[in-house]
Image (tube, grey):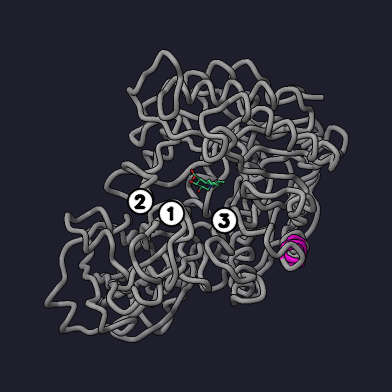
Amino acid sequence: MLYPRINERRSVLSLDGVWRFCLDDGTHGDRIDEAYISANAENISVPASYNDQKDDLKYREHYGWVYYERKFTVPKVFKNERLVLRFDAVTHYAKVYIDGKPVMEHKGGFLPFEIELDGLVEAGKEFLLQVAVDNKVNHSTLPVGNEEGTAFFGSDNAGVPSVEAAKVWRKKRNLPNFDFFNYSGINRSVRIYTTPKSYIKDIVLVPSVDGKDGIVDYRVETCGKEKVSIEVFSREGVSVAKAEGASGRIRIKDAKLWNPYPEDPYLYSARVTFGEDEYTERFGIRTVKVDGHRFLINGKPFFFKGFGKHEDSAVHGRGFDLAYDVKDMSLIKWMGANSFRTSHYPYAEEMYYLADEEGVVIIDETPAVGIGAGTVQDPYTTFDIRSHHEDVIRDLIARDKNHPSVVMWSMANEPDTEHYPESAKEYWCSLYDFTHSLDPQDRPVTFVCCQNNYETDLSTREMDVVCINRYYGWYNLSGDMDAACHAWNIELDFWEKIDKPLIVTEYGADTLPGFHLTAAEMFSEEFQVMYYDRTNSELDKRAFVVGEHPWNFADFNTIQGVFRADGNRKGLLTRDRRPKMGAHYFRNRWTKIPNFGFKK
Ligand code: E8X
């Protein structure tokens, strides 16, 4: 799927701004009730989550449907163009109406969807756009929620005779199986873009290296009968190669490779023309490969220094915020990091384009968080999750396939792989094959494993890279870093025998900025530093540990509960991006660790 761009042939009209909005009172569902909306509508900003834009718990804790609407006129000049309405992300379920008529639905809160407006909207004439949005999470959504059960982090049933009994008198609510606030609504931009009637639908670019030359295998999908041509330009704008036809191979003599920062993330651009239409996609030439226990980028052993992140900020919630994206890129570099994981859902497309340009490596994750958490049944045979999971992986790859920054797909975060190991293995290994089969660049595939009994777990070891979230010294062996290091070594001995690259995709300690101690105990800034320093000393001894991603880049908001005072405080930065001591610790460490060759 192509990102909407303005060029000589195409235009983009933004529908971002102040929309009319109201919460359902529980009686309308996905149905648009004009009278109800006009009686209750108030202003809301798009894009942004609705939860923190107003000052009442009913917005923050809303369960179910809400309605958005605005009027719009496509200028007459676009009369002869093809018009496409595109939502970058609506969380979690959207039903779109034009002039009262339902025109499309979309499940999943973090990926784009679009519809051609031919026959629905006339250029020069005002129309009414309405979107009903549902934020319910349950066992058929990704991320997963325990609608009828107990929350993983909510601890909501103390003193309640039984969960069954509470259902009778307790208001229905979202009980997320995930530790980030269920920020909802039109979280990313809404646009109408134009193309000529015959148009370029998609561009697939697969780079490789042949001696000093770069090779690009390309395929262009089109609608119409015109001829495709493609021309590649250097960063300086010089034409370096050309080809004709909808697919083929291009050779770039003496190519410059895309390398992570501080090396040069060199980008070429491919200009595709097709009749009246034209689209330019930037790309990098780089290779990615797992070789024994090494993760190779451009044939060299790479070390992942970076974070698990979130799209999370005050007021906006999970709403798209380009200034935060730019700031976060700056902070990533300031700390000497080179990578991050899009924990726990695909991020806004703009972030990937920034990462391509700035040379930051991405592990691209689906929103499949919490599969099997908090349930007693086998999630893989009990719940109908597979087909939606496949849809999400398909759409994620369709969206992100050309980014040089993306070096690995993460199919999920912390599914249960321990209690039903055989059915977990069947699920994850078949989904692994599925993911590989869809990626034109055939990048490594993994999922991120929760702290578990790694000997019982049969799935994690089957992935291209073993990715583990571990909290020795925090959630277990709390505060005892001697014991934590001991436990780490027992576990690392186990993984050493598996002989695959391993990334510690999460480890961390909640830390209150400004809380200082001489003798480092939990929650103090000194403890966070000690926790990482002691753990890293053990990880450094193991060549197969090819990455460290502290949890989390910054403090972030989550569901209230006894473990969470003003959100999850494991950030190296505060929520407004000020450094804790831990950030200075990693800056000092990482600026001395090179991207390549840190471990043999
Ligand atoms: C945490 C993290 C959470 O925020 C993240 O989304 C997933 C969690 C730890 C799981 N990983 O709580 O800070 C802890 C399992 C403990 C045994």
Say if disc 1 is inside 8 Å of ligand 1.
Answer: yes
Q: Which residue is mark 1?
A: 153
Q: Position of residue 180 (x, y in %)?
A: 42, 51
Q: Which residue is mark 2?
A: 561
> In this image, 593 relative to 68: left or right?
right
The quadrant the N terminus occupies is: bottom right
Q: Amino acid at mark 2?
A: Gly
Q: Which residue is mark 3?
A: 279
Sequence-wise first label, 2 or 1: 1
Q: Position of residue 547 (x, y in %)?
A: 67, 33
Residue at image position (56%, 25%) is 532
- Label 3 to label 2, Cα distance in Å? 48 Å
Name above or below for residue 331 compared with residue 292: above
Give the SS element for disc 2.
loop
> Could you classify mark 3 by the number of other residues whose Cα lies within 10 Å: few (under 14), some (14-19), or many (20 or more)?
many
Residue at image position (84%, 43%) is 498
Along the line of sight, the residue nearer the viewer: 500 or 365 = 500
Residue range corresponding to the magenta coloring: 424-432
Q: Can I make out residue 228 in this image?
A: yes
Mark 2–mark 1 CB contact (< 8 Å): yes
Along the line of sight, the residue nearer the viewer: 430 or 199 = 430
Q: Main secondary structure of the magenta part?
A: helix
> Could you classify mark 2 by the number of other residues whose Cα lies within 10 Å: few (under 14), some (14-19), or many (20 or more)?
some
Q: Is residue 428 magenta?
A: yes
Name above or below for residue 330 compared with residue 591: below
- Label 1 to label 3, Cα distance in Å? 46 Å
Residue that protrudes farthest toward the left in the picture: 39
Q: Amino acid at mark 3?
A: Tyr
